[in-house]
Amino acid sequence: MQYYAVVLLVYFGTDLLAIWGLNLEFGVAGVANLGFIVLIAVGAYTYAVLTLGPSSSNGAFQNYIIGAHLPPAAALVIAVAVGALAGAVLGLTGLRRVRQDYQALVLLVSAILASTIVSASPRIFNGDQGLALVPPPVDTAHPWRYVAVVAIICLATYPILRRFSGGPFGRALRAMRENEDTAIAIGKNVVALRIVVQAVGGALGSLSGALLIGFIGAWSPSAWQYLETLALLTAVIIGGTANDGGVLIGTALIPVLLLQGVQFLPSIPRHPGLSADLSTILFSAITIAFLFVRPQGLIPERRRRYAVPSSQEPTQALRDFALRLGRPEETKAVDDRLMRIAGLRRSFGGVRAVDDVSLSIAAGLVTGLIGPNGAGKSTLINLVSGTLSPDAGSIGFRHRDVTHVPAFRRARIGLVRTFQLAHEFGSLTTLENLLVAAQNQRAEGTAGVLLGSRYWRRQEHANRERGMRLLEIFGLEQQANKRARELSGGQKRALELLRALMVGPRLLLLDEPLAGLSPVLAERMGELFRELARDGMSIVLVEHDLAAIERLCDHVIVMAQGRVLAEGPMAELRQRRDVQDAYLVG
């Protein structure tokens, strides 16, 4: 029984490290790494070849590269570093943005390819035979010492893990998981985030593999199949995705009790292979059951709560925000052109959605953009914000050519947009939706994460105060701790606008922000637009409500069939026959 206990506890600790890494990738960041098992294998192989010594010293019955006699502690550290590098390389699969399920398939194929290459390389990796006689990091004559070492490593790893999965960095990962397009629109470099999180996951997976091979003393490609990743993923789902504590339960239930514990069962007469397959049958059934009945897991993702201050009148909150918004040294004169667009074109198949558009946007004005459905308004907004790339033409913003600047960098320099349909980060709270949009956050860099909350606590507190003041503009401060997906349609629309303001825009692109709002909320939002413009912000307002356009906009641009048809004050445009034919009549 003592032997069984040691085996199960070691497997629990090593599996927990791997599951923490997978939970960070999948549960927190939304990266469905179905090839995660290859990172565990990388750690195991690295540790083995760094401690086995030259292959010629092993009786020539196994062949492998490197072959060193490093101390086990050094081999563990190097294995972790190699695993982090391997994880970052896998993260490069996200350089080309594809659907999440496609990326998961790419990572799965990568794992299958790696396993196949290892099996087909007997002189480099010893092929299907794998590696044996791997020395343990501690004396196995005292097996409980190994349990203690694994436990100490888990306890030391958890605080580091929490710095990545919690705090502002974890909040940014959750935003990316919820909606990549929206995360990019508030200035998040989702590619860099994905590479970092897969590097950390790779380090944890490799640490798990190195400790495990040191315990069992052997490594074989047959033990590192994609089914193993699915078992770890099941543990994440059952415990609770994005819950570092919850996956403790999932680890105990799936990889330990089912995958390992079932091996200690006696064989079943007339069905000798059934006991070995029973664990796969059970965890497959449990996975399906949880996905249908309780997809959030036994312990769901924790909601973060903040103290809510006493509210103030919305008008006063608006004035207070406007005072804090102003950056006089950057405010442009009204006739200065904040943005210049020249010869912009974009086609979809044979349809030219934007056809040789040239226009300019003045600083400190609310500019309306109107036109019938299919006129190209939303496509133009997508081109200006960087969501789409133009086929031809140029975009200049604040005396800088941003035609080929990535969308997240445009947001960081003050070119911010909202979407036609409300895009909230649903699992984040209302206040967190604003906090994640704050720029230059210390805790979102790797150094800031490792230095801990003392390094970024003061900045986080200031961002929280600013977020609360913003929520007061629309009376949402009492909803600060409610998950954003639980808000009403109008509240979500207001939240999206406030989140855009949290970025600190100089030019705000609003795609039908008043659609579906109550008259009171629409009036308050219009008041905010005018207040922001008086403070020097430029706003482009795409809207079908012509009364609102005439009431709010200083200048109006009319588009039809992908071209700019006319521009000027709305009162004058109403009188033009070409505008009436294209848009106003009918």
Image (cartoon, rainbow, N blue to C red):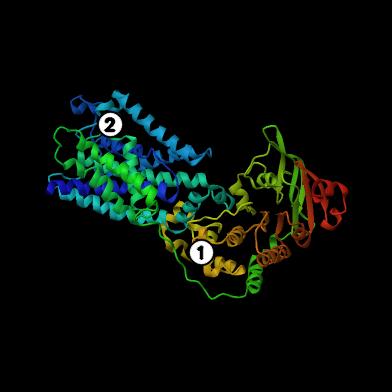
Q: Which residue is mark 2?
A: 222
Packing grade of label 1 (10 A; few <14, some 14-19, many >=20) is some
Callout 1 secondary element: helix
- Nearer to us of marks 1 and 2 is 2
Callout 2 secondary element: helix
At label 2, the amino acid type is Ser
Disc number placed over residue 405 in the picture, else none: none
- Left or right placement of residue 515 versus residue 107 in this view: right
Where residue 69 sits: x, y (%)? 24, 36
Q: Which residue is mark 1?
A: 459
Q: Nearer the viewer, residue 370 or 357?
A: 370
What is the quadrant of residue 68 in the picture?
top left
Packing grade of label 2 (10 A; few <14, some 14-19, many >=20) is few
At label 1, the amino acid type is Gln
Say which residue appears at 64% left-offset and 51% top-offset. 420
* Count of labels in the image: 2
Vertical placement of residue 112 versus 425, above or below:
above
Where residue 518 sits: x, y (%)? 65, 64
- Left or right placement of residue 275 versus residue 201 in this view: left
Residue 206 in view here: no
What is the quadrant of residue 523 in the picture?
bottom right
Q: Are marks 1 and 2 in contact (CB under 8 Å)?
A: no
Where residue 156 sits: x, y (%)? 30, 55
In the rendered structure, which disc, 1 or 2, sits on the residue that comes first in sequence?
2
Vertical placement of residue 168 versus 267, above or below:
below
- Left or right placement of residue 504 versus residue 71 in this view: right
* Separation of residues labelled 1 and 2 (CA atoms): 50 Å
Say which residue appears at 45% left-offset and 49% top-offset. 29
Q: Nearer the viewer, residue 543 or 395?
A: 543
Vertical placement of residue 68 versus 321, above or below:
above
Where residue 582 sits: x, y (%)? 81, 46
